[in-house]
């Protein structure tokens, strides 16, 4: 039984308050030094004109898309932009690769075409065990692409093999709070970057 199961009550007002309180606890336990290192990686990629790739499955796929939008377009810097691509967004590519090579290959195959040494790969996964992301991280290591894992639960294999990461400390299968926190990290990081580049 995880925290959400323990907090559940048929009274939606009470459950809402408990959920908000728990989410606040989760957010408060995120290591802000990990956020700082992630920001440094993104700023370094921008400075050196490297590409940042985002990947994820399910809800995390939409977070990957959202993060890519906020970082590339939302920062409103066209002279020296963040070069960002979400590899979750082209349904033709994803279904072709999944059909021809298997779902576990959908990100590796795209990286083989698009990634270069010095680029950055950001994987988003609550469990940290998504095979297609783990495979992508292993490939990134082989070709000199820096990997960053945004995880939850116990971090899974992604946390173990990533170069850097931000871990959201939740119990197993607490997808809601985990994905909530990942989305907040998107808005926090891009809000900071949008403003810090104005000062540069």
Image (cartoon, helix red, strand yellow):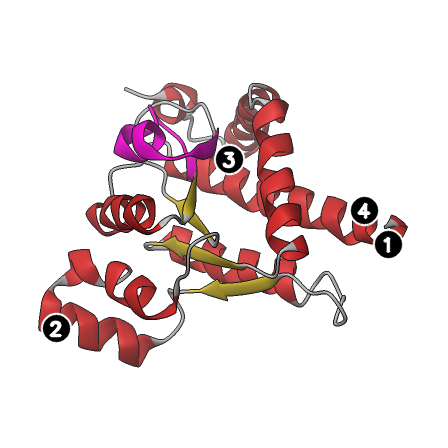
Residue 89, position as x, y percentages in the image:
40, 70
Residue indicated by mark 1: 198
Give SS at disc 1: helix
Alpha carbon of mark 1 to alpha carbon of mark 4: how far?
A: 5 Å
Residue indicated by mark 2: 99
Residue drawn at x 55%, y 33% is: 16
> Which residue is at the front of the view, 15 or 25?
25
**Other residues around mark 3 within 10 Å, as few (<14) / some (14–19) / many (≥20):** few
> Which residue is at the front of the view, 117 or 137?
117
Alpha carbon of mark 3 to alpha carbon of mark 4: how far?
A: 40 Å
Rendered image: mark on residue 12: 3
Quarter of the image where one finds residue 157: top left
1 or 2: tag closer to the N-terminus: 2
Indicate left or right for 86 with 108 as reference: right
2 or 4: tag closer to the N-terminus: 2
Bounds of the magenta segment: 149-166
Rendered image: mark on residue 196: 4
């Amino acid at each position: 039984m995880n925290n959400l199961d323990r907090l559940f009550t048929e009274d939606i007002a009470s459950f809402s308050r408990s959920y908000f309180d728990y989410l606040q606890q989760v957010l408060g336990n995120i290591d802000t030094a990990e956020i700082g290192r992630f920001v440094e990686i993104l700023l370094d990629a921008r400075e050196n004109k490297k590409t940042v790739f985002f990947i994820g499955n399910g809800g995390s796929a939409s977070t990957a898309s959202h993060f890519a939008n906020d970082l590339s377009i939302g920062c409103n810097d066209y002279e020296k932009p963040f070069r960002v691509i979400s590899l979750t967004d082209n349904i033709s590519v994803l279904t072709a690769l999944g059909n021809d090579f298997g779902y576990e290959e959908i990100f590796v195959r795209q990286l083989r075409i698009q990634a270069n040494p010095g680029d950055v790969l950001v994987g988003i996964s609550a469990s940290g065990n998504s095979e297609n992301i783990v495979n992508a991280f292993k490939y990134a290591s082989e070709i000199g692409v820096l990997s960053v894992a945004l995880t939850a639960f116990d971090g899974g294999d992604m946390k173990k093999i990533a170069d850097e990461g931000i871990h959201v400390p939740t119990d197993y299968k607490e997808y809601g709070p985990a994905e909530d926190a990942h989305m907040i990290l998107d808005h926090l990081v891009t809000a900071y970057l949008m403003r810090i580049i104005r000062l540069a």
